[in-house]
Image (tube, rainbow, N blue to C red):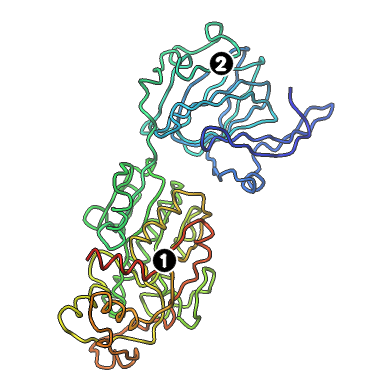
Amino acid sequence: MTEFGKDLSVAETPIPGLLVIELPVHGDPRGWFKENWQREKLLALGVPDLRVVQNNISFNNDVGTTRGIHAEPWDKFVSVAHGSIFGAWVDLRAGDTFGQTFTAELGPDRAVVVPRGVGNSYQSLAPDTVYTYLVTDHWSAESDYTFLNLADETVAIDWPIPLDQCEISDKDRQHPPLSAVTPFTPRRALVVGANGQLGRALRAALDGQEHVDFADIDTLDITEDLSQARPWRQYDTIINAAAYTAVDRAETLEGRAAAWRVNVEAVANLARVATEHRLTLVHISSDYVFDGTTEIHVEDEPLTPLGVYGQTKAAGDLIASTVPQHYILRTSWVIGDGSNFVRTMASLAERGVDPRVVDDQHGRLTFSQDLAEAIVHLISGDAPYGVYNVSNDGPVLSWAQIARRVFELCGHDPERVTPVTTEAYYANVDGPVSPRPTHSTLDLAKIRRTGFTPLDADIALQNYLARC
């Protein structure tokens, strides 16, 4: 029987992501009314934004009509418009909860969010039952589906009406037992720019995860139309680790065009695909989107880029932010596998070269391994979408101070490093020089609130040099 006047509430179940929603139903002698899906209220209670594309209705003539168990490659919001059902759900996703079951009766006053890969089934408990479900994708023959037999003895669903007394389709009777079910695989993630410093760190961080694909310029040109480049229905995340980072060359005619092509046009291509297919886009930004007049930068600081590189990164940020599900990670002074400042200083120290190093630009190093771990943390947790500053933690230093620390850790006299101003350092450089932010330090409070603790930069530096 429908219960009138209850408060809207959401409860978790033993199946991760399967949520039971108590719906307020308002009745009088004429009948009743309910808000079946009220996005703003449900999101405030922690229900994911399903962004449904289709509404399906199943009418069931008789008591005992039984359907399922079907696991489909989309999320569903299931409710009842008339009558009541006994619902049974089985987790058919690969993982520790494979085979976990949950059952509940649903009437007009109760609904369920069913995640992709969780088997859905029900038995009508009243005549003329109307079962309705909102879905997040359109049916496609290319999609993967998984089925489980209604009478499987392993999950042992306690059906109110014995199955031999029920109306069941021949197809549903022939579904396999749990022992023969191939677990539903996760949607795939795609890392682009997989051969750069961050891309190689992501390869290490995601090593062994079969659902992750890696692409570089030779296998996927993100500056071209991407609409048919991949079977995007099979993906849920794109991590954009590709970028044009030659900041001085970006000030030349050819470099400017290349920077805009990679840092802006390619981001627009990725954003278009992510929006159309409801994917999460992870985009890597830079401290160069700021002019550096503020000593510590927060996420919502207005964009004030100085040079072409910074301008293209700022434009890319704005494009990426239009994707409903996005993480923009703003970082600084990245050090990883490949040619970089730390390796250069260590090499100079070993070769007996005494460098002049800029002492009036201040910030923190970001080691690509730690940046990759921050990305994995965000996409695998429940962190809200948006912009996050990510660097290593610790004292704010100049490039010259970092160079001296590298010399010291490599067993050389740090006094061999001569601090100079930016103006003096570039005084005799032949060719265009991009303006640099004076202050590149990023406030890390927001990423910490998600449960991620950035590693101290000096500890990360020691670990990095130990591996070199």
State the residue at coordinates (34%, 89%): 422
Using the rendered view, name the quadrant where residue 341 is placed: bottom left
Nearer-N-terminus badge (1/2): 2
Mark number, residue 9:
none
Q: Nearer the viewer, residue 63 or 409?
A: 409
> Residue beneath label 1, please?
316
Type of amino acid at the residue the image marks with label 2 = Asp
Quadrant of the image containing the N terminus: top right
- Disc 1: CA contacts within 10 A as few (<14), some (14-19) or many (>=20): many
The mark total stands at 2
Q: Position of residue 103 (x, y in %)?
A: 58, 24
Mark-to-mark CA distance, 1 and 2: 54 Å
Name the spot of residue 178 as percent of width and height, x first.
40, 21
Rendered image quadrant of residue 196 = bottom left
Q: Secondary structure at mark 1?
A: helix
Q: Residue 33: percent from the left, percent from the top?
A: 75, 33
Q: Quadrant of the C terminus?
A: bottom left
- Give the numbered dot on residue 158: 2
Image point (23%, 52%), residue name:
219
Indicate the amino acid at tag 1.
Gly
Left or right for 177, reference 424 = right
Answer above or below: position of 415 versus 346: below
Query: Which residue is more in the foreground, 467 or 88?
Result: 467
Q: Is residue 427 left or right of residue 184?
A: left
Secondary element type, mark 2: loop
Toward the left, the furthest residue is 351
* Foreground residue among 244 and 158: 158
